[in-house]
């Protein structure tokens, strides 16, 4: 067994997984898994820079995670940073802060590397079934689309994410038809681009990350967010369309009152759900298999 700590720092949230990895059995046993919404990508699409307050929120979460990692005695740490830090002019400031707190330099990975980690994390439990998969990791700043079976066959990262599209189009609550149409136009253009590389109509659709799991929790009617109930749930297209329509028509307070809704997702869930819905339509997917295992698990396996 190797005790590993994986950190995934995205546009909207930063997440930690401390786990015992057993390469002999293929098991990754969770010891601690947590998420903090820090909105690192605040304003990056507009300014090209990481905001000082966003950096401080992220560093505060890193200090908390450093204590958790030390308490569990993790032997190896890997910190992966994704879309927002790829795009920012001042990412050196971010790198220096993380190195000072955690003693490890964050790796600002490419969209293709992000896709590979996501695919590994999402499908490792499903391997050996002889199925093709289309893995969709809908993040804050980007969406990774990966096709494969036992490994990655094709991957593409596109710059549509729940935070990026929300900041770009500023949808009201409820969102207007024009706002929804503008968001959908960006999504369709990105899917056109992704479709040149990734066969979007092939394989079982597996959806990852907070937008997908939140839509799933609402579709399942959960009284509280329950990872065990969400993991590997199969959500039909019609249910995703119903939930998305409800979110588009809801006020801020109505969305905030949904039991399974994380406070940090209230203002970005409309864009996230629209990405999932458009992807299901483009892929002709009758359902989406929702996975709680994702890039964090892929990072964990990469260092085991």
Image: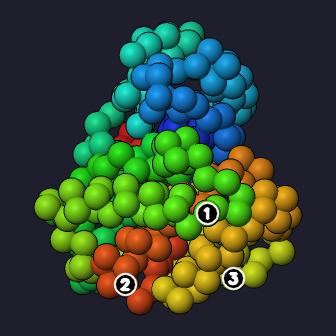
Query: Is 191 positioned to the left or the right of 143 in the image?
Result: left
Disc ID at residue 285: 2
Contact flag, marks 2 and 3 (Cβ < 8 Å): no
What numbered label is drawn on residue 105?
none
Under circle 1, the secondary element is loop
- Label 3 or label 1, whichever lies nearer to me, is 1
**Looking at the picture, how far across and down is residue 17, in whole percent?**
58, 45
Seen at 31% across and 71% down, the residue is 134
Chain-order first, disc 1 or disc 2: 1
- Mark yes or no: residue 1 visible: no
The answer to which of marks 2 and 3 sits earlier in the sequence is 3
Left or right of 211 on screen, residue 228: right
The residue at the point 30 percent across, 56 percent down is 190
Residue 13 horizontal/vertical position (percent): 60, 41
Residue, disc 3: 220
Question: 303 or 153, which lies in front?
Answer: 153
240 shown above or below 303: below
The coloring applied to the image is: rainbow
Marks 3 and 1, the one that precedes in the sequence: 1
Q: Quadrant of residue 124?
A: bottom left
Label 2 CA crowd tier, 10 Å (few <14, some 14–19, many 20+): some
- Camera-nearest residue between 199 and 46: 46
Identify which residue is drawn at 69% across, 25% down: 57
Q: Is residue 268 left or right of residue 3?
A: right
Quadrant position of the C terminus in the picture? top left
Q: Residue at x 66, y 45 (%)?
A: 35
**What's the CA distance linking mark 3 and mark 1?**
26 Å
Are the residues at dot 1 and dot 2 in contact (C-beta closer than 8 Å)?
no
Q: Position of residue 200 (x, y in %)?
A: 25, 72
Disc 1 target residue: 176
**Alpha carbon separation for disc pair 2 and 3:** 18 Å
Provide residue 84's location: percent of width, then percent of height: 45, 32
């Amino acid at each position: 067994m190797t005790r590993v700590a994986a950190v995934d720092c995205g546009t909207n949230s930063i997440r930690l997984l401390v786990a015992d990895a057993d390469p002999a059995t293929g098991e990754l046993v969770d010891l601690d898994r947590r998420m903090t919404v820090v909105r690192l990508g605040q304003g990056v699409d507009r300014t090209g820079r990481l905001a000082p307050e966003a950096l401080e929120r992220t560093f505060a979460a890193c200090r908390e995670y450093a204590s958790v990692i030390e308490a569990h005695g993790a032997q190896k740490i890997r910190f992966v940073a994704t879309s927002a830090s790829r795009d920012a002019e001042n990412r050196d400031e971010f790198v220096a802060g993380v190195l000072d707190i955690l003693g490890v330099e964050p790796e600002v990975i490419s969209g293709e590397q992000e896709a590979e980690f996501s695919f590994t994390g999402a499908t490792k439990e499903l391997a050996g079934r002889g199925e093709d998969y289309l893995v969709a990791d809908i993040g804050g700043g980007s969406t990774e689309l990966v096709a494969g079976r036992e490994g990655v066959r094709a991957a593409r990262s596109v710059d549509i994410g729940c935070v990026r599209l929300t900041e770009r189009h500023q949808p009201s609550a409820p969102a207007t038809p024009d706002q929804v149409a503008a968001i959908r136009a960006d999504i369709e253009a990105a899917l056109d681009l992704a479709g040149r590389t990734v066969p979007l109509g092939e394989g079982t659709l597996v959806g990852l990350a907070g937008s997908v799991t939140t839509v799933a929790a609402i579709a399942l009617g959960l009284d509280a967010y329950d990872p065990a109930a969400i993991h590997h749930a199969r959500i039909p297209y019609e249910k995703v369309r119903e939930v998305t329509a409800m979110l588009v028509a809801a006020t801020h307070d109505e969305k905030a009152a949904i039991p399974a809704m994380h406070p940090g997702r209230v203002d970005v869930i409309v864009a996230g759900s629209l990405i999932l819905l458009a992807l299901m339509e483009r892929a002709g997917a009758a359902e989406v298999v929702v996975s709680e295992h994702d890039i964090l698990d892929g990072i964990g396996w990469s260092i085991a």
